[in-house]
Amino acid sequence: MLRRRRTISSTHHSHPPVVPANEFVADFIAWHKKPKPSLNKAIIAFGLLTFLGLLGIVIKLFTVGLENRYDWGYLAAITAFLFSTAGCTPFVILGLRMIKAHWRRPIARIAESYSLVTVVTFSLVLLLLFLIPSSQNRRTIWFQNDTVGTVGAIPFTPHLYVIIGILCMVLAGLGLWWTSLRPDIRLLNNLTKSDKPTNKSWVGNLKQWRVQNKGLAFLGAFFFMTFIWAITLYCIDLCMSLVPGWRDAIFPVYQTLSGIQGGLATVILSMYFLRRFGGFEKYIFMEHFWAASKPLLATCLLWFYFWFCAFIIFWYGRMPIEQDLLQLIMFGPYNIAFYIGFSFCFLVPFLILLWNVVRKSVWGPPVASAFIIIGCLFDKIRLYVSSYSVRDDLSYHAITEIPATILPNITDIMIIVGGFSLPIFIMLLCTKLIPIFSIWEMAEGLRLTKMTTYLRTELRVLGKPE
Amino acid sequence: MQERVFLPNKQINDDLLKGSFETPWWYLAWMGLFAALTAWGIFAFGYAINKGLGVTGLNRPIMWGFFLTDFIFWVGISHAGVMLSAILRLAKAEWRRPATRAAELLTVLSLMVSALHPIFHLGRPWRFYWPFPYDFSRGIWPDVRSPLVWDPHAIFTYLIGSTLFVIIALIPDIAVLRDKTKGVAKVFYGALAMGWRGTPRQWKIQIVAGFLLSGLLLPVFVSVHSIVAWDFAVNIGTEGWHVTIFAPYFVIGAVHSGVSGVVTMLILLKWMFKWDDYIRQEHLESLAKLLIVIATVWFYFFFLEFIFALYNLEDQEIALRELQAFTWPYNLIAFVFLFFGYLIPVPLWLFRRVRRNWVAMFITSIMVNIGMWCERFLIIVPGLARKTNFNFSWGSYTPSWVEISIVVACFSLIFLLIMSFAKVFPLIPLFDIKEGQTLSDDIQIGKRTVPALRVEE
């Protein structure tokens, strides 16, 4: 009697046959060389939308100037949103690289390429810094006067620190992206017989690979630290310290976690679009979405946990200063934004991802990710627009009145649309210009994978080098 | 560098069950010492019951001292089990295998010991059941708005969950013991093995139960120490306590001390039972790397907690931090806390040579726990010592011999219980080690053989 061989991968449709590394490289180069008219159209469309955002900023500058902080709340919110989504994707991939997760490989380049977005984010922060008062007569984490001549004064506090912190993050992200990209650029040039004089120094000898490995580890650690530091500075100096009486030690952690959640969601959505429109079903399959959905679910729960840790302390304490704060950032003028943010960052994705059958699908995690990205935007709006709307003197110990809701005007809507389009535009541009798959990492992964049979079950074997 | 060792199943059984079948002299000596110290602690507690809490160093306004510091410390240690066992099991980290049982056991035992501390702290310990709604007919309900009522519920839920977790992972190993023993022992192990025969269905249920419990324990694990943190943080009357970051700060601190506790325990097990083939340098190195990440996250949280205490530049907060950092004896405790908890061990762990050195890891992991104990003391006592609007006076605190005896006895009790457990059950899961060997494979790439892993979907 013939026994049917039980194949775990085939029953779950999770893992197509392992493609030889050389076949993948040839396949990908052919795809990369192929003309893609729809991609060009998309680049133009999203480029125009991004330009619209830029136009919105310029119009705002000329119409309202930099006199009043409350006119710029939406720009601060979209900047924070970019930090928390595209800006955080390299952070996500670093974590996965650190724990040697194999499923990171198809998404490594996409995630690292989002570092380019941080260059624009940095420019937006520079603009916002003109709206931030100096450290005189107000609370900051720098505890010093910036008046020249006084003891311990450092001029341009906290502006200088914010610029240094975020610039370090941008440079580390770009360094990481370029270090990872070098072998692939050279390979592409070789295989396409391009005459471009780029990256001739890379020959791929053992020493260069070792240096590249060390470089990635070093830059990764540096990015890791600078990213957390940059988000901490941004959310304290450009948000919390603008509201008298708001003292919330967990806020930077909450913002960092929100960034990791948004970054992961961005990566999953990018992965879905690459599979759906790039035709990479052979390399991005259910297993990648399933693996990514687990940390996504964890971040949803952690989002709630960090939010609740702040909420319970303010709510339980019953001090007027804290009750006013809860009104300002949660239940008052921005309650709708808060409810949407809460539902989309925690409740809806949690209820979606709770089910293994949904997690174990190609569509489930991207749907949850889409909710998270929208939720993230609303969450930033309720935090940043509300804090920019406070008109009290910053030397006060509490807010004297809760300001009314500031609804977005046409320039704000242009800025939001532009901010939303910017990462998509940059990603599409990268898809056209550089290998959107990390070829060396993919090839390494394929070489480290084989199928084997144990008793009657076919299993996948994953190499785990040092 | 992975140092894989492939051993026949029989040898694994013999090696890991050595503790159950042999009783060396040092075992009896240590048991005697720990039993004596525990007995001394019981005597001290009896003395405190007889004379009242006045025999301790607690006084107005410092009503929380050594007992509650130790309570938080042991709740913290209990976080090792879920961190190592549940999270690493869900993440399918291979190197977790020899450490899981020790971690789970440490969780259960430290929770049991931590639950004793509020009872030591009660003036009338025989009324320990008052937080529970024990008498519906009289209409007496505990005040559910109080975090002091949330605490016991969270701890007992965690204790029940983690005990189940230990038992489920133990069943296959108990069955091995049943098959290797005779007489009364066979009956004992046979009853505990609950009819385990190792059929595919039983394995499937055991694995599914392990995963489900891992998932269910995670929120409980986070909630337990969060609730302990809220005992302090929801209080607006004590300076330095009303902080939003306290809950995650306590949780990550607990994981830091818990994982360090597991490292200490694993090294001791390796030395005591000569389990060199099972607890290897690669495991130590992976744990050290994990500790670097955990410790650094914890330090970031500490930094935020400290910075935001000073953020409002209020005189009282600044004075409290000055008391903690610059006034004797708190300055010494603060020094030990910072240097032992982070500044000495973490830079050392960055060096591979240290991560793979048994003695260095043993010392640094103990240092972390000394530092973390001091951290808890610094959170509790200086905040209470200062005169505030609600307590009208300053205070100072010196622990009495009763408190010191009880705290030392609790440490002894933990060791006593671990050693007793090691006499009855294996402290390294047999089935996990065998499964790890079964799932190991190699991949040949060019001239190199890369260690690989068979992946279950």
Image (cartoon, coloured by chain):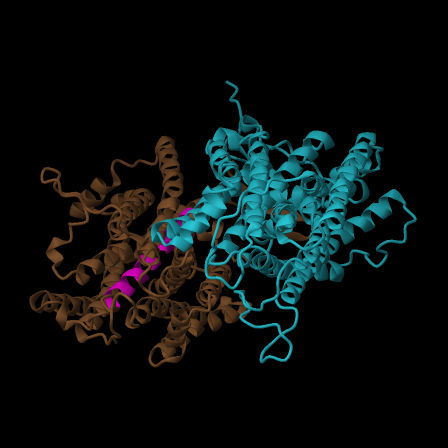
Chain colours: A cyan, B brown
Please indicate, yes or no, whether residue B123 appears anywhere in the rendered image. yes
- Residue B137 at x, y = what percent? 10, 37
| Nearer the observer, B139 or B127 | B139
Farthest top residue in view = A1
Please provide the residue range marked out in magenta.
B66-86
**Image quadrant assignment for residue A144:** bottom right
Q: Residue at x 44, y 52 (%)?
A: B96
Principal secondary structure, stretch drawn in magenta? helix
| Residue A210 located left or right of residue B327 | right
Of residue B189 and residue A241, the one placed in the foreground of this image is A241
B37 is higher (above) or lower (below) than A272: below
Percent position of residue B239, x then y: 35, 66
The correct choice, above or below, for B356 with respect to A392 in the image is: below
Is B26 on the left-hand or right-hand side of A68? Answer: left
Judge whether B234 appears above or below B388 on screen: above
Place of residue B394 in the rendered image (x, y in percent of width and height, measured from the top left): 26, 75
- The quarter of the picture where the C terminus of chain A appears is bottom right
